[in-house]
Image: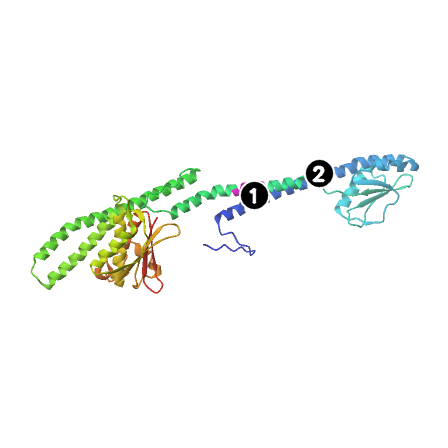
Amino acid sequence: MKAAIPLPSGLTWPSTLRSRIFLILLIGLALAYGLSFSVLYMERYMSAKAVMLGTLENDVATSIAVLDRLPPAERGDLLDRLSRGNYRFVLGPGLPGVPDTSSKGAEISGKIEEAIGHRFPIRIERIPGDVNRLQAHLTLSDGSPLTIDVTPKGVMPIAAWLPYVFIVQMALLILCTWFAVRQAIRPLGELAAAADALDPNKDGPALSEAGPSEVAHAARAFNAMRERIAHYLEERVQILAAISHDLQTPITRMRLRADMAEESPEKDKLVHDLGEIQRLVQDGIAYARSAHGNGEKSTRIDLASFIDSIAYDYQDTGKAVTVAGLVQGAVVTKPHALRRILSNFIDNALKFAGAAEISVERSAENDIVITVMDRGPGIPDEMLEAAMQPFFRLEQSRNRETGGTGLGLAIAQQLTAKIGGSLRLYNRAGGGLAAEVTIR
């Protein structure tokens, strides 16, 4: 599994493509949504500011004109009626403040001066405190002081239900992003699973070609590649079978001629070499048949008797083959294929260890597990998988007596697939190799 890519800020990218696309889409959409919200907020702020300044410019002029014409005794009765949400009139000098030099104060002062036509000198002061508060001081025509107490409001109030709408929108945003990423990544997961399960020697289901055009094109390309690989493998096996079959006739003629020749050391060497060639040809034919031989039908056999018969056949020829454990009962399988599998395991054990031990167990999943064990040199762990490839030999001297043809385990693997089982090689504790075939 690849490590996550470090970011300059110390954060790390998620390790999966699904998480990365989800994160990129979510951040992008959230930023776009935040930008839209910011634009809306600024628009509301500017609208509120325009409303406030427009009110000051229009209503204040009228209110000051009315107060200036009224007798001083009657002015107090109209103060509440002339006040608005963001300003009110106060008879008198107001509260002590400090000169305001802010742009907002200058803007408010300019609007009020424009409203009253520059007839009354005005002075803007800021009232210290937690609340943003301004007071405009002026003197009416009769010398009475008048104060306009202004409390600027930034934006119009937000509705109480708006946060809940925001939460619902974010939830929908996350849900839609997740669904979009899932739809985009699912074909990749199916393609990866199909690639992991790819086995041209098995007639598995083809990858579904449904979905968007790009996904369908990739699925069609994968299925075509699978068919080409299977065709190439079939051609390879057919060539091997044809060559092996055609070699049998000249080998037989050579063997007859060698047998009719006079006795000599050269004759013995020739007969020995012809025997090696014949074994190689026979193994090649057996491998080809194991790859494409589906003629044998599954039958029910008594497992204990079957294993005993294999061990007795070897014991009758003086080979050290023993049975360590048996499972009573019947199993449905291809007996000739299973016999060839176990015979190949036993032959390898006898060749490299001089003795073989057969063990039969029932797994927790109720499968039958047959293991052929030995105490030979084993196989290096890094070569266990390669040992089941055709023509792979641990002994590199090219001597057939010690290295064999390299087809025994490959044939066993092919036949195991034909009977619907699985094969595993592993080194035993204390030395030796175990070849395990599981029948489901």
Q: Is residue 134 left or right of residue 26?
A: right
Helix, strand or loop status at disc 1: helix
Please name the residue shown 50% across and 43% down the image. Answer: 181
Instruction: Work out whether residue 189 or residue 21 is closer to the camera in this orientation and state it.
Output: 189
Which of the two marks, 2 or 1, is nearer to us in this view?
Answer: 1
Instruction: Work out whether residue 311 or residue 131 is closer to the camera in this orientation and state it.
Output: 311
The correct choice, above or below, for 99 with respect to 208 in the image is below
Measured as percent of width and height from the top left, residue 267 is found at: 11, 61
Instruction: Work out whether residue 308 or residue 388 is closer to the camera in this orientation and state it.
Output: 308
Q: Which mark is residue 174?
A: 1
Q: Is residue 228 left or right of residue 283?
A: right
Is residue 159 within the magenta segment?
no
Measured as percent of width and height from the top left, residue 102 is found at: 76, 48
Q: Which mark is residue 271?
A: none
Q: Is residue 103 left or right of residue 222?
A: right
Mark 2, Cα crowd under 10 Å, few <14 / some 14-19 / many 20+, is some
**Residue 341: in sight, yes or no?**
no
Dividing the picture into quadrants, the one containing residue 275 is bottom left
**Residue 41: in sight, yes or no?**
yes
Mark 1, Cα crowd under 10 Å, few <14 / some 14-19 / many 20+, is some
Measured as percent of width and height from the top left, residue 227 is found at: 32, 43
* Three-letter amino acid code at the position of disc 1: Ile
Dividing the picture into quadrants, the one containing residue 280 is bottom left
Please name the residue shown 30% across and 61% down the image. Answer: 374
Q: Disc 2 versus disc 1: distance between alpha carbons?
A: 32 Å
